[in-house]
Image (cartoon, rainbow, N blue to C red):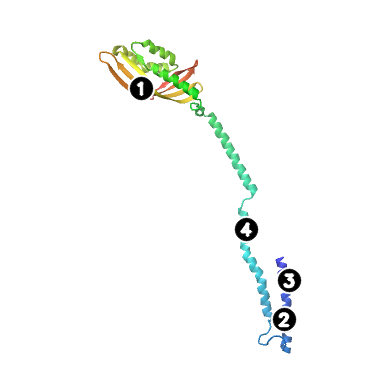
Amino acid sequence: MSTTRHLVNRRRRLATVAAATTTAPARARTGSGPDPEKPAGTAKDAAEDITEHEEEPEAEHEGSAPEAEKATARRLRRPSLPVVLCVVIVLLGAFAAWAFTSAASLRDDPSRQNTALTDISRTSEVKGQITEAVGAVFSYDYASPTKAQTAVTKYLTGKAVQQHEDMLAEVRAQAPKQKLVLTTTVTDSGVEMLDGDRARLLIYADQRNTRTGKSEETTYAAAMFSVDAVREGGSWRISAIDTFTR
């Protein structure tokens, strides 16, 4: 539309120039028309006027061209909606795959099967019974050796039986001579692992060793060790003892 208008205007100006070129000599001969000192516009002036008017639209186009180029560049840089949606779908798919794999690995990890913090009833049960067992099997009275043996039968199983035998061998050997009484009291305990009928506990205990021979003497010591426990016949029993010494 803009180009057609400019073309029509240009043709009109060209017609004006032609008319001015034709009438100028006649006016000069007859002396009519404008003041001779200020002659009417010549063909050259009219042509220059046409040129100026023709250059104006070009100037407008020159000024608007950079804006058009910038707009085009912005459209090229801006991703289209389908591309964005494809990227989002790919990212969501990757996240879903990662989440599924992570969940499966957590379910398969044995350490994640620990219910010590979630099964409060079972945790309290194993803690109470093993606390009682530790106090019984690690106490010894020279006057009642059968009581210690009964505790071993009741509370120990598996390799814990031989471990306990080795740990208290010196106490049993010296007890009759020194009239020795060993008393172990659990001061604190914690369930590290609970998985079904298996558990592992950390034990803190105080031990009092009293010699009631010619001169009575009492010594105290603190102990820390861990025990593995299994549930057999409805009761928890110690199956292994770890004193953290090698």
Residue drawn at the location 65% of the way across and 74% of the way down? 52
Mark 1 or mark 4, earlier in chain? 4
Mark 2 or mark 3, earlier in chain? 3
Side of 207 relative to 231 (left or right): left
Asked if the residue at tag 4 contacts the one at tag 2, i.e. Cβ–Cβ closer than 8 Å, the answer is: no
Spatial distance from mark 1 to mark 3, Cα to Cα? 114 Å
Q: In the rendered structure, which amino acid carries the disc numbered 1? A: Asp
Give the label, 1 or 4, closer to the camera.
1
**89 is higher (above) or lower (below) than 34:** above
Mark 2 or mark 4, earlier in chain? 2
**99 is higher (above) or lower (below) than 181:** below
Q: In the rendered structure, which amino acid carries the disc numbered 2? A: Ala
For mark 3, give the secondary structure. Answer: helix
Q: Does residue 170 appear in this view?
A: no
For mark 4, give the secondary structure. Answer: helix
Query: Which residue is situated farthest in the bottom direction here?
Result: 30
What residue does disc 4 label? 71
Side of 59 relative to 25 (left or right): left
For mark 2, give the secondary structure. Answer: helix
Spatial distance from mark 2 to mark 3, Cα to Cα? 19 Å
What residue does disc 3 label? 8
Give the label, 1 or 3, closer to the camera.
1
Asked if the residue at tag 1 contacts the one at tag 2, i.e. Cβ–Cβ closer than 8 Å, the answer is: no
